[in-house]
Image (tube, rainbow, N blue to C red):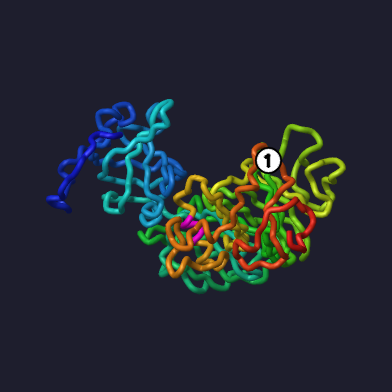
Amino acid sequence: MVRATLSGYGVLGTGDVLTGFAQDVSQVDLPAFLPAYESELIALTGTLNGPFSLAGAGHEQAPLVTAGVPAGSPSSFNFRLRVVETVRDQLDLVQGCTVSIVSPLWFFSTGTGTPLTQPSVWAPQQLVSSTCPGPRVTGAQAAGPESVIVRLDRRIDPASVLADGSQFSIAGLTVTGASAPGNREVRLETSAQVPRQFYTVTVASTVRDNAGTGVEPTSRTGNFRGWKTPAALRITEIAPGVANQRDLMELVVLQSGSTEGITVVDAASATPLATLPDVEVLEGDLIVIHFNPDRVTPGVDAPGSELTSKTAWPQAQYASNYDTAWDFQGGTFGISGGQRVHRIRDQMGNTLDALAAVIPGFTPIPAYPVQLQARQAEGQWSPSDCNGVPCTYNSFPSAFDVSFDWGSAFPIGGTKTTTVGRVLPGDSDTASDWALGPATLGVLNGTVR
């Protein structure tokens, strides 16, 4: 979208009101007439007609309908509101909100097919007004043997939540207290839960968002299972760069408990690489996660995760399994190379362990230093900074210097014979914990590699 190349300029003024220059295009089929309006300042009122999804680094988008682009029309499939992620969070926008914006018209084209027409919001002041539906319950989760977290899609006004918990009911449990920290959650105190028993929590419409709107009557319930002690896990070995993304990750159990809901996360992606099943594991057990399992070749990967024993799908029948470990299956993506932070998160989203790894000389990934800094702030990677400043590609030491170099683990046509593994069973949360060496998957690393 290059329009001009400037050799120099001077700022004569800022802060002028531009509203009078905006064209109201609420009645216009913008995707159909995109060339006539692209990059122009527009005023528009429309309704978010679907959930938000990723729309480039730091941005999200949602389907948008207006009088000129009604739902179901041919143009509606290429019409989105695009918002900076932090701005969307600040404005508390969700599906069903009606918004009025004044902003330049943006579009996105991959070079093939019809471009996406994207009225965009980069700053809160570009949203002139918004009217949103009441908060909806999106889920619930046991947070302890006598506590539950109820999640909603909009921020809850703490003053609307009664401390005695009387606005919440759970069949089979007594709710004894409630509190809202001012975000999109309410924490309940309950009588003792039966482990793994299914419960349903119902929220009264007197619980309101910050706009004073009560919980939607059709979205007042959330289901959860009774609390069970979670397992604590640590990453011990990774086989990245395996052909066809059949990568592997080995974990050791530090505390006995359930693995349900524990995730393996690449910090660059919003989708977990793996979500573990509900299996009771014991301290000292090993887990091997199989990413992008082979669903075609007979006798390679098992039909699913092992849920009852470490030999439920024996190696003699499925060659990729390990009879000395629990074999769990991940999603359809493997472990990406370059600058990456991989971490294990518990059921509540807390980081249990992390590995920050880089390939020196690989094209720098802009988001990596921020991801590294987040793990340092959590106490999951050391040093905590780079000589008193946040670690970046240009700091001293740099983000490369404090991360583990795993470049040699990505050979052409890679196999799982050379892996990234812990040097010793301990954990100092530094790059020195890790080394390349012969694979020992299914056997706990106990000596220097």
Going by the image, does 332 lie left or right of 177? right
Residue drawn 58% across and 71% down? 189
Of 141 and 373, nearer the camera is 373
Majority SS type along the magenta span: helix
Where residue 344 appears, x then y in whole percent? 62, 58
Image location (x, y in percent) of residue 390: 44, 64
Position above or below: 388 against 243? below
Relative to residue 88, is residue 34 drawn left or right? Answer: left
Number of numbered discs overlaid on the protein picture: 1
Any part of residue 309 in sight: no
Residue at horizontal 46%, vertical 57%?
370
Percent of width and height locating residue 321 = 79, 46
Q: Secondary structure at mark 1?
A: loop
Q: Camera-side residue: 255 or 197?
A: 255
Residue 91 in view here:
yes
Task: Examine the structure image and report whether residue 370 is included in the region drawn in magenta.
Answer: yes
Three-letter residue code for mark 1: Gly
Crowding around mark 1 (Cα neighbors within 10 Å: few <14, some 14 to 19, many 20+) is: some
Instruction: Indicate the quadrant where residue 224 lies.
Output: bottom right
Which residue lies under the disc numbered 1? 414
Q: Quadrant of the N terminus?
A: top left
Identify the magenta region.
Answer: 369-373
Tell me: residue 180, above or below residue 291: below
Residue occupying the point 38% across, 30% down: 115
* Residue 43 placement (x, y as % from top left): 24, 41
